[in-house]
Image (tube, rainbow, N blue to C red):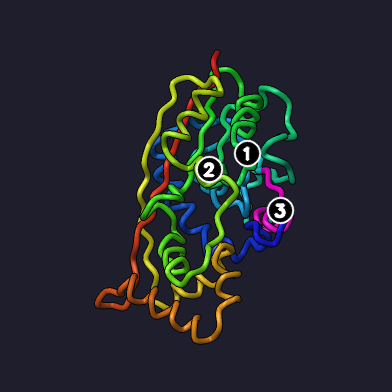
Amino acid sequence: MSENQIRFDDGAGYERMMGVWSRLAGDVFLDWLAPSPGLRWVDVGCGNGAFTELLVQRCAPVEVHGVDPSEGQLSFARSRHTAGIARFQRGDAMALPFDNDSFDTAVMALVIFFVPEPKQGVTEMKRVVKPGGTVCAYAWDILEPGGFPMGPMQEEIRAMGRTPMLPPRPEVSRMDNLRALWVDAGLTDVATREITVARTFDDFEDFWATVQIAVSMAQAIREMSPDEKAQFKDRLRARLPADASGRITYTSRANAVAGRVPA
């Protein structure tokens, strides 16, 4: 894996940066999905367990398996989980370590654009879900304005003549492409939903702290001179003005998709 690819190994850092965003979007996603209790789930690309915990808290699953390639993320997921329902293990989204028809529902939360072959990832989710079960995902609309929590920072990076890091397959996050993946995989009753969520930071320094630990931003910031870094902060401060209390609020948008394995 090259140094220019995005890797998530710090579960605590991810929690401060993206875990909060993930749960905000995940709440809306689960409201839309409205799953029955007592299901067996697999959370593909579970990372530090942010969405896994949301599943446990909200959906009364009988079993959840979280799969991720990063042992650092998995270690954080295990440490935060106290309900005893979820199990976490290393695994590849394109070759899930489970038998056919093992689960009622498979989900990818903010993951599909990191899968090198998204079609294979969807095929694998379908394989491990029982007939009549659900295969679903949500992903930041990463190529569109307002579609990614790191979007404002990426726009300023570009304005400074630099190239921000993107996941391997950002194009699959577009709604039409997600729908096509699900339909082409032979899933039925395919439905989509746009999700817009807002996050508030206490002040600019609170916001800036999350920017600096964002994997897709950290490298670009490290490469800046002190003057460039100060300019970058000033540009961000102007782009995301604070309210009367000093708080900064902005929105991001995700696309969600769900379909059923044919009975």
In the displayed image of the protein, which residue is found farthest to the front? 161
Is residue 91 toward the left or the right of residue 208 in the image? right
Quarter placement of the N terminus = bottom right
Q: Secondary structure at mark 1?
A: strand
Return the mark for residue 55. 2
Quarter of the figure with residue 205: bottom left
Quarter of the figure with residue 179: top left
Query: Circle 1 is placed at which residue position?
Result: 64
> Alpha carbon of mark 3 to alpha carbon of mark 2: how far?
20 Å
* Above-or-below relation of 128 to 225: above
Is residue 196 toward the left or the right of residue 211 in the image? left
In the image, residue 79 lies at what x, y percent?
A: 67, 58
Q: Amino acid at mark 1?
A: Val
Quarter placement of the C terminus = top right
Mark 2 or mark 1, earlier in chain: 2
Q: Amino acid at mark 3?
A: Ser
Q: Are there few (<14), some (14-19), or many (20+) residues within 10 Å of tag 1?
A: many
Would residue 186 be visible to someone looking at this image?
yes
Query: Circle 3 is placed at which residue position?
Result: 70
* Above-or-below relation of 211 to 86: below
Mark 3 or mark 2, earlier in chain: 2
Mark 1 or mark 3, earlier in chain: 1
Return the mark for residue 37. none
Instruction: Tell me if residue 153 is in the magenta stretch.
Output: no
In the image, residue 114 lies at what x, y percent?
A: 60, 47
The residue segment tinted magenta is 67-77
- Asked if labels 2 and 3 touch by Cβ distance under 8 angstroms, the answer is no
Q: Look at 39% across and 80% down and name the residue there.
A: 234
* Above-or-below relation of 54 to 249: above
Q: Secondary structure at mark 3?
A: loop
